[in-house]
Amino acid sequence: MRSICLVFATILLDSAMCCAAEQSWTGKISDSVCGAKHKATDEHSVLKLSDSDCTAACVKSGAKYVLWSNGKAYRIDNQDFAGLQDHAGQTVRVMGKMRRGAIKISQISPHLKEHKGEKSSL
């Protein structure tokens, strides 16, 4: 009986470690108010803002950073991550762990343009 419990404990531990592995996502750093499309005139009472400026303005007003990828907004767990502000409104590649539906970012870098014949994940 003891060996059966040990086997089940090992299986559970292995599956938990598998789920905790780092993953990567490619997408655009945006905000929880605007999502994928920034409508500067409607939301900020100005004629035109870049995606970067719009994201920064929304976050300053209380919105949260999100990663917009493949038609879905992913919440970002660590809102104070250093690279978020620098990459706001840009397409990036993030590394991190998914936990409770939110990404905890460990690394962020600019997404290099796709090579001819390759498809982007956006």
Image: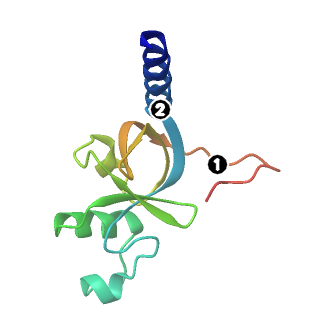
- The residue identified by callout 2 is 22
Q: Label 1's element? A: loop
Q: Nearer the viewer, residue 55 or 7?
A: 7
CA neighbours of label 1 inside 10 A, class few (<14), some (14 to 19), many (20+)? few
Q: Residue at x 40, y 67 (%)?
A: 51
* Three-letter residue code for mark 2: Glu
Mark-to-mark CA distance, 2 and 1 = 23 Å
The extreme top residue here reads 3
Identify the residue under disc 1: 113
For residue 65, above or below residue 22? below
Type of residue at label 1? Lys
Counting residues from the start of the chain, the first of labels 2 and 1 encountered is 2
Tell which residue pokes out farthest to the left in this image. 61
Q: Residue at the right extreme?
A: 117
Does the rendering let one see residue 68?
Answer: yes
Residue 22: x, y in percent? 47, 32
- Identify the image quadrant of the C terminus: bottom right
Residue at point 50% right, 65% down? 72
Pinpoint residue 112: horizontal percent, then vertical percent.
Answer: 60, 44
> Measuring 37% from the left and 40% from the top, which residue is drawn there?
105
Depth check, mark 2 against mark 1: the one in front is: 2
